[in-house]
Image: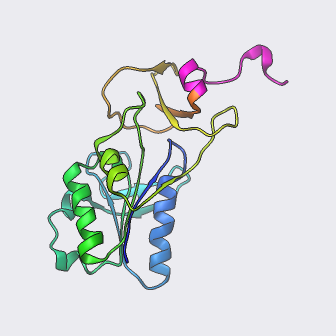
C-alpha cells in the first residue's frame, strides 16, 4: 500500500540530496520516479533540482503535475517533491489522491517552518495528512540538533521580520538550535572560543 511521506528538516539537512538519491534508487532498479518542485523555486534554473553538495537532476514543476491525467501519473512508480513547503493545500490534496487512489507513493521534502518559526501552507497540510513524518537532522554550531531556519541580512545579521518566502541558501540562512535561535547567537562567544 502506497504512503504519503513528509521528510522535513532545517536548512542544510540534505533534503534535496536525499530526494535525488531516492530518485536514483528507483532508476537503478528499473523503475520510474518523477521529480517535482514548485515553479517559484528558480534558484538552480528551470526544471533542475540541485543539492548543496553538487548532486542535480531534471524535474518537472508541481504546477505541471496538477494538469496531468491519472493515466499519465500511473506511468510512474513514485513521485518525489522537493521544496514541498511551497505547495498549496490543493497540491497536497492531489498527492493524497495519488497515494490513496492510484497506489503510488509520494515522498515530499521540505521545511516545516520559516525563519519566524511559522508554518508554510504546504507543510501544514503535509503534517496533517502524511502517513509518515520523518525529520532529517542537521546540527547547530554548538553541536545540538538544529530545527530553526535563521534568516540573515546582507551583513550576516539575524533578521526576524519580512516576507515569508525569500529564496536563498548559505548566503541567506543558517540552521540553529532553538536556544541559539532565541538568543540570536550565530557562533560561540569570542572569550569562550577554544575552551
On the image, the x and y values in percent for residue 100 come to 27, 71
Seen at 60% across and 45% down, the residue is 138
Residue lying furthest top: 191
Q: Where residue 49 appears, x then y in whole percent? A: 40, 57
The relative height of residue 170 versus residue 159 in the rendered view (above or below) is below
Name the residue furthest bottom: 30
User: Dividing the picture into quarters, in which one does residue 71 lie?
Assistant: bottom left
Residue 16 rendering spot, x and y as whole percentages? 47, 55
Residue 189 highlighted magenta (yes or no)? yes
Given residues 42 and 190, the one toward you in this image is 190
The N terminus lies in which quarter of the figure? Answer: bottom left
In the image: residue 108, left or right of residue 182: left
Asked whether residue 41 is in view, the answer is no
Considering depth in this image, is 149 or 27 the residue closer to the camera? 149
- Residue shown at 48% from the left, 84% from the top: 29
Which region shows up in magenta?
179-195
Q: Residue at x 32, y 31 (%)?
A: 164
Nearer to us in this view, 44 or 30: 30
| Left/right of residue 105 with respect to residue 8 in the rendered view | left
Does 147 sit above or below residue 30?
above
Residue occupying the point 58% across, 38% down? 146
Q: Nearer the viewer, residue 77 or 28?
A: 77
Asked whether residue 10 appears in the rendered view, the answer is yes
Q: Quadrant of the C terminus?
A: top right
**Location of residue 166 in the rendering, given as x and y in whole percent from the top left corner:** 35, 33
Amino acid at each position: 500500500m502506497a504512503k504519503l511521506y513528509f521528510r522535513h528538516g532545517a536548512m542544510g539537512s540534505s533534503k534535496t540530496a536525499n530526494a535525488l538519491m531516492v530518485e536514483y534508487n528507483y532508476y537503478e532498479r528499473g523503475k520510474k520516479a518523477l521529480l517535482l518542485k514548485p515553479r517559484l523555486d528558480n534558484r538552480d534554473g528551470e526544471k533542475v533540482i540541485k543539492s548543496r553538495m553538487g548532486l542535480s537532476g531534471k524535474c518537472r514543476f508541481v504546477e505541471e503535475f496538477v494538469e496531468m491525467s491519472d493515466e499519465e501519473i500511473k506511468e510512474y512508480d513514485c513521485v518525489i517533491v522537493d521544496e514541498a513547503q511551497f505547495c498549496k493545500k490543493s497540491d497536497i490534496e492531489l498527492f493524497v489522491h495519488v497515494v490513496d487512489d492510484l497506489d503510488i507513493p509520494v515522498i515530499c521534502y521540505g521545511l516545516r517552518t520559516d525563519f519566524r518559526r511559522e508554518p508554510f501552507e504546504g507543510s501544514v497540510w503535509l503534517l496533517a495528512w502524511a502517513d509518515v513524518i520523518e525529520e532529517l537532522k542537521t546540527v547547530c554550531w554548538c553541536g545540538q540538533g538544529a530545527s530553526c531556519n535563521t534568516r540573515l541580512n546582507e551583513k550576516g545579521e539575524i533578521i526576524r521580520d519580512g516576507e515569508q518566502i525569500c529564496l536563498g541558501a548559505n548566503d541567506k540562512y543558517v540552521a540553529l538550535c532553538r536556544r541559539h535561535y532565541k538568543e540570536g547567537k550565530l557562533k560561540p562567544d569570542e572569550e569562550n572560543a577554544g575552551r
